[in-house]
């Protein structure tokens, strides 16, 4: 659970306007409810612990507010969803409404009978048979014997367990247990139905069946329903109203679709309050997204994405192909410069097997020459063999190197005599600085910059030091703060050359700084910046491993963003706003698990934002 | 006292829940044992044989006529209290999954355990009848007071059960302590010795032992064929009610906090 999650309300909760014209009867009234747990004394299970705690005056310490002044009303016929990340107090709230837990402050008014579907199957004794359990569970849920007798067949039919009725339930599959539990709990037609994550049990068929049953209860019997779910889609599908609770605080309440939309982008994500407000405003802004500006390049995994990326980059078939170990960021990114020299696509592979998507693309590309980066531990002989089988007439070479510094030195030696040769500027960085390398990749491709890695002790290996000290390079760009390698070391290292350190507050800040450098050296007066910007996520940069071979070829720039970090989203919005006159295309790298449609549209809107548009939409 | 319809409904509901739980316990207890319910009869019988052998051969405390019957009467009624309190003590803790998820009257759990032991006690009476048959002791009409005694002991045990089950939630130490208390109580109650062998001081102290009164009551109606005096009834009832009232008070005061500790 991230610590800096915002909990302030996003709207004026005192005046939920969506409720004004509703005349339906009030079924549940939650009135300023707070729940306080005393963490210290709740863990004392013996007299000794109690006595010790008493002596230490620890008994009333460590209060934990699971719910903080939550109020809402649910009217008859409402399907009310409760959203929130894990540990936000949803279940506590449901327990209070179900009457299992008493609130520490505030009150609850319930109008009618409640059927709680909180963690189904409480009270099942697995030693007993299903038949016995149906009666037992029914009794515990407060059904009368007569009612169970009458409904027995219906329960059995719904649960689909007729043949196994007299078998002890311990022999049942968990799905069958869940089916029986759900059938018993929903056989009654309550006034209020409480559904807590139950729809996540059982197989797909059964989940649909459960959902149909609940829908039926809603439609035909006007049952009021309260649903807690992690599944945003489920809430959006079933509910008409929703509340979003974060760490016990109400954040938003209203139309289920609105709340879900906001929750999807902001829910549980870290970031300062200011950034969140910025993102929230942008979400609500009516700004249109310029047509055709959003583009996505994605595959089913990083290899698929890489194949698509190389396809779009437009390499002429029959050239050189670079095969890099796709499980590691550093060797992939150090290949950028070499890719620029050889005008070769960068293709990541798994260590043991050449991914299907990559080999498919390679077949179309039909390389005349294949260069593998890394020794057999990184790219196995098996991969090399399968390449040899696929491309009998191509020349296959391997650049050896176990460690990144060794490999980077060898890559440099390899590239020396090839094509246009290395540029005069080199990058020096450490393993883990992937964000900066991604940001730099357009430049390191065009300017054919070698990338060198230093070791954990803050020094480069001897071969690397020799290369840097040689006359071939005249400028060193050091990526990363001086905690990784010191100024003194750099001064010692570079004798005749100059060096410059590039270190940002974080990778997003560094991204903007690097983009500026790239723009300076890259573009001329007539077009001061790139037309296409590639948006990569930082929380899993795997999709961006071969980005250099695309961005360099297409003269694009990169924008780093992490949709889960609202600060980075807000920064990206700001940055795109600044560049809005230049950007013609935003290319998102990765599928919907990286960027949701909402994430994309947020940045799309940023393109057409005006100076004051966010504040205009602030209602 | 006129009960409202809702209250009556609630009581009926709770009664159905309790009987369902008793039937569950019953099924679980005898499932997969060859002799099944017969154990409820065999157990006190065998126990009586062991005790009778030990106490009539090695440790004789004076001559008690019909010693086997004397033993089994004391043991069965004591077992009713001991077993129901020991089982009830765990009842709330064991029902944690239910308490956390379903709105349910928590008092059901200890009471159900007591009721289950009452059922067991009734079955074990068969053992008592067998002993009476073997030793040719004819019952007198005073045996008809037995239901009254069962109610006294059940109410008394229910009081203890409620208190113990509530306390056990907060202090698990109670679970360990109670088995020691039960053992001590077994020896402190004249189950296999006559009260007359005790020194005077202890005989006086014995008057404050509720189990002594219940055991004596049982022997009076089943072994000696006498009708206990009104004051004996009054003492038995009084002790049961006091225990019940204290137990109920402890339970009710704490039940809303159970969910936080189980």
Image (spheres, grey):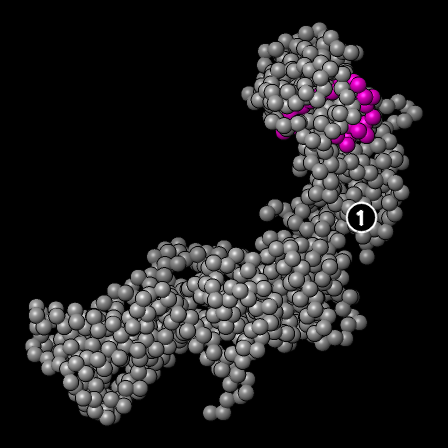
Please indicate whether residue B248 sits to the left or right of residue A296 in the image.
Answer: left
Residue B89 in sight from this viewpoint? no
Mark 1 Cα shell of 10 Å, populated few (<14), some (14-19), many (≥20): many
Which residue, as the protein is rendered here, is positioned at the far right?
A: A526
Q: Is residue A316 magenta?
A: yes
Q: Could you tell me residue B170's position as x and y percent?
A: 40, 63
Badge 1 marks a residue whose secondary structure is helix
What residue is shown at x 68% (from left), y 51% (from top)? A267
Tell me which chain the residue with mark 1 is part of.
Answer: A
Q: Position of residue A221 (x, y in %)?
A: 70, 74
On screen, residue B258 above or below A63: below
Where residue A492 sits: x, y (%)? 62, 12
The quarter of the picture where residue B42 lies is bottom left
Residue A558 position by quadrant: top right
Which of the pair B96/A434 is nearer the observer? B96
Q: Which residues are magenta?
A: A307-328
Residue A83 lies, with reference to residue B202, above or below; the image says: above
Image point (84%, 32%), residue name: A532
Report the residue at 74% width, 75% height from top: A24
User: In the displayed structure, would residue A460 be above or below residue A484?
Assistant: above
- Within the magenta stretch, is there residue B101? no
Q: Residue at x 81, y 33 (%)?
A: A533
Q: Compared to A61, does A500 lie above or below?
A: above
Q: Which residue is mark 1?
A: A282
Q: Residue furthest top?
A: A471
Which of the image's four quarters has the C terminus of chain A? Answer: bottom right
Residue B55 seen from this side: yes
Q: Nearer the viewer, residue A284 or A501?
A: A284
**Place of residue A554 in the rendered image (x, y in percent of width and height, measured from the top left):** 83, 26
């Amino acid at each position: 659970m991230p610590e800096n999650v915002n909990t302030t309300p996003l709207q004026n909760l005192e005046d939920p306007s969506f409720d004004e014209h509703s005349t339906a009867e009030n079924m549940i009234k939650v009135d300023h409810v707070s729940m306080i747990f005393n963490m210290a004394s709740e863990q004392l299970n013996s007299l000794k612990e109690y006595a010790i705690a008493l002596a230490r005056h620890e008994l009333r310490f460590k209060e934990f507010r699971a719910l903080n002044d939550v109020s809402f009303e649910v009217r008859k016929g409402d399907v009310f969803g409760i959203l929130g990340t894990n540990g936000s107090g949803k279940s506590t709230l449901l327990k209070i409404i179900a009457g299992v837990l008493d609130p520490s402050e505030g009150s609850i008014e319930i109008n009618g009978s409640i059927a709680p579907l909180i963690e189904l199957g409480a009270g099942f004794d697995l030693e007993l048979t299903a038949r016995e359990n149906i009666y037992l569970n029914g009794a515990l849920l407060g059904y009368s014997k007569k009612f169970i007798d009458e409904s027995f067949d219906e329960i059995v039919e719904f649960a689909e367990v007729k043949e196994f009725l007299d078998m002890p339930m311990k022999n049942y599959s968990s799905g069958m247990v869940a089916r029986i539990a759900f059938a018993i709990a929903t056989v009654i037609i309550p006034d209020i139905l409480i559904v807590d994550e139950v729809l996540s049990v059982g197989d797909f068929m059964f989940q649909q069946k459960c959902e149909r049953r609940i829908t039926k209860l809603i439609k035909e019997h006007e049952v009021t329903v309260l649903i807690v779910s992690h599944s945003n889609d489920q809430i959006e599908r079933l509910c008409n109203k929703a509340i979003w609770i974060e760490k016990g605080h109400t954040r938003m309440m209203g139309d289920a679709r609105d709340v879900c939309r906001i929750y999807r982008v902001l829910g549980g994500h870290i970031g300062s309050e200011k950034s969140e407000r910025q993102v929230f405003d942008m979400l609500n802004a009516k700004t249109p997204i310029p047509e055709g500006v959003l583009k996505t390049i994605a595959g089913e995994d990083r290899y698929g994405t890489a194949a698509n990326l190389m396809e779009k980059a437009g390499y002429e078939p029959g050239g050189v192909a670079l095969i890099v170990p796709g499980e590691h960021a550093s060797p992939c990114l150090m290949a950028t410069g070499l890719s620029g020299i050889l005008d070769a696509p960068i293709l990541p592979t798994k260590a043991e097997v050449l991914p299907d998507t990559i080999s498919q693309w390679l077949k179309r590309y039909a390389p005349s020459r294949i260069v593998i980066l890394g020794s057999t531990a990184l790219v196995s002989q098996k991969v090399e063999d399968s390449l040899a089988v696929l491309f009998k007439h191509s020349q296959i070479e391997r650049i050896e190197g176990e460690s990144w510094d060794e490999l980077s030195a060898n890559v440099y030696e390899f590239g020396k005599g090839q094509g246009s040769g290395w540029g005069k500027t080199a990058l020096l960085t450490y393993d883990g600085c992937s964000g900066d390398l991604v940001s730099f990749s357009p430049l390191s491709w065009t300017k054919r910059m070698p990338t060198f890695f230093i070791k954990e002790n803050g020094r480069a290996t001897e071969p690397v030091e020799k290369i840097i000290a040689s006359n071939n390079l005249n400028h060193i760009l050091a990526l990363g703060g001086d905690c990784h390698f010191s100024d003194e070391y750099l001064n010692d290292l570079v004798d005749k050359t100059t060096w410059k350190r590039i270190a940002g507050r974080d990778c997003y800040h560094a991204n903007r700084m690097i983009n500026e450098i790239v723009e300076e050296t890259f573009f001329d007066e007539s077009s001061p910046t790139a037309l296409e910007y590639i948006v990569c996520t930082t929380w899993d940069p795997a999709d961006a491993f071969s980005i250099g071979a695309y961005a360099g070829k297409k003269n694009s720039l990169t924008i780093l963003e992490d949709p889960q970090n609202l600060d980075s989203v807000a920064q990206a919005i700001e940055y795109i706003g600044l560049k809005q006159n230049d950007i013609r295309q935003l290319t998102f790298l990765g599928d919907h698990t990286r960027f949701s449609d909402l994430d994309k549209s947020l940045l799309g809107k940023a393109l057409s934002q005006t100076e004051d548009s966010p504040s205009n939409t602030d209602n | 006292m006129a009960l409202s319809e809702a209250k009556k409904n609630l009581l009926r509901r709770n009664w159905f829940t309790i009987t369902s739980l008793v039937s569950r316990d019953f099924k679980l207890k005898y499932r997969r044992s060859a002799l099944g319910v017969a154990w409820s009869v065999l157990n006190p019988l065998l126990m009586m044989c062991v005790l009778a052998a030990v106490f009539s051969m090695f440790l004789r405390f004076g001559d008690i006529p019909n010693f086997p019957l004397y033993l089994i009467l004391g043991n069965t009624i004591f077992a009713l209290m001991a077993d129901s309190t020991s089982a009830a003590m765990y009842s709330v803790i064991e029902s944690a999954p239910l308490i956390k998820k379903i709105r349910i009257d928590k008092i059901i759990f200890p009471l159900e355990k007591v009721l289950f032991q009452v059922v067991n006690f009734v079955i074990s009476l068969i053992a008592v009848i067998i002993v009476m048959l073997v030793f040719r002791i004819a019952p007198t009409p005073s045996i008809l007071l037995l239901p009254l005694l069962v109610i006294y002991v059940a109410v008394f045990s229910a009081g203890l059960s409620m208190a113990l089950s509530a306390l056990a939630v907060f202090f698990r130490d109670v679970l360990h302590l109670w088995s020691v208390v039960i053992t001590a109580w077994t020896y402190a109650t004249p189950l296999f010795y006559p009260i007359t062998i005790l020194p005077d001081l202890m005989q006086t102290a014995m008057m404050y032992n509720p189990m002594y009164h219940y055991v004596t009551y049982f022997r009076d109606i089943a072994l000696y064929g006498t009708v206990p005096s009104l004051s004996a009834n009054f003492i038995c009832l009084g002790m049961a009610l006091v225990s019940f009232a204290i137990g109920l008070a402890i339970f009710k005061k704490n039940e809303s906090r159970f969910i936080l500790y189980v």
